[in-house]
Image (spheres, rainbow, N blue to C red):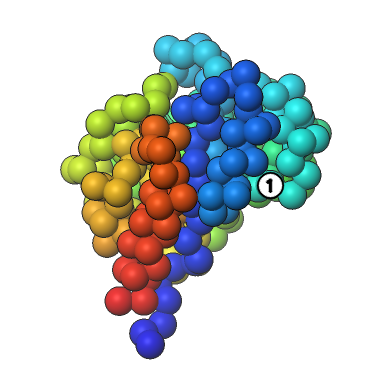
Amino acid sequence: MAARDRPECKIAPSILSADFARLAEESKRMISCGADWLHVDVMDGHFVPNLTIGAPVVKSLRKNLPDAFLDCHLMVSNPKQWILDFAKAGASLYNFHLECVMDDNTNEEQATELRSLINEVKASGMKVGISIKPKTPAEWIVPFLGEIDMVNVLTVEPGFGGQKFMSDIVGKCKIIREASKEVHIQVDGGVAPSTIDACAAVGANVIVAGSAIFGSDKPQEVIATLKKSVEAAATA
Ligand SMILES: O=C(CO)[C@H](O)[C@H](O)COP(=O)(O)O
Ligand SMILES: [Fe+2]
């Protein structure tokens, strides 16, 4: 069998599509259907035009799901402000946006600020991920790959679930995967059985899907389909 070209596949249902009144129950249902991680979309109504949940909800989820991997996607303007709250609440991975600190990849001060945030997240005990919006070039994150656990390539404009997958964006994963076999590459936005092969082909291994999984009456089958596509591409 050919050697793997990426880390193990992780399927991360986005609980943004869950019934928030039954979050713990719905999260447990996802894990029993084969989910590896839970993707928690945190929106501050400023970085994106929507408001969702914060650290208190993560704390309740952690209490109810002591062993779950909580992948927190911080769509917030000031990621520094929330690091300790999320660490104390029990977040597993703090996945914040590059655009909060960088609008020019040649600016040394911005690179230093990004490094300091990365180090602060690590020091808090969480794993660290960096999310990039559709218009942010993949090359901007490449110099930091050795310092982080994951890159989240947004395949929709962040802010809302249920949007259409941007197929012209996913190619950015290829640039990142060519630069690192070890880093987790997450795809987030409009990912479904109909779009997974395009993600798998370019090296993605962490698959977020909200509406495709929660909207199905057979979530177990959707999760299995997504995983199969990634695992087949990983050893092709
Ligand atoms: O970060 C996000 C939106 O900003 C969500 O994680 C993403 O949109 C997942 O939902 P869906 O699979 O329904 O697109
Ligand atoms: Fe997300």
Image x and y of residue 45, in percent: 50, 12
Cβ at disc 1 under 8 Å from ligand 2: no
Above or below, 139 relative to 161: below
Q: Residues within 10 Å of mark 1 (few under 14, many from 20)?
A: some
Above or below, 21 relative to 199: above
The residue closer to the viewer here, 215 or 109, is: 215
Q: Residue sitting at 32 percent across and 36 percent down?
A: 190
Res 77 visible = no
Q: Residue sitting at 54 percent across and 23 percent down?
A: 19
On the rendered structure, is 32 left or right of 157? Answer: right
Which of the image's four quarters has the C terminus? bottom left
The residue closer to the viewer here, 140 or 28, is: 28
Residue most extreme to the bottom: 1
The quarter of the displayed image where residue 20 is located: top right
Res 34 visible = yes
Image x and y of residue 69, in percent: 65, 47
- Label 1 secondary element: loop
User: Which amino acid is tagged 1?
Assistant: Ala
Which of the image's four quarters has the N terminus? bottom left
The residue closer to the viewer here, 43 or 175, is: 43
The quarter of the displayed image where residue 80 is located: top right
The quarter of the displayed image where residue 90 is located: top right
The residue closer to the viewer here, 12 or 101, is: 12
On the rendered structure, is 46 left or right of 82? Answer: left
Q: Which residue is mark 1?
A: 68
Image x and y of residue 225, in percent: 36, 56
Q: Residue sitting at 54 percent across and 60 percent down?
A: 146
Instruction: Tell me the quadrant of ligand 1.
Output: top left
Image x and y of residue 217, in percent: 41, 38
Q: Residue sitting at 60 percent across and 48 percent down?
A: 31
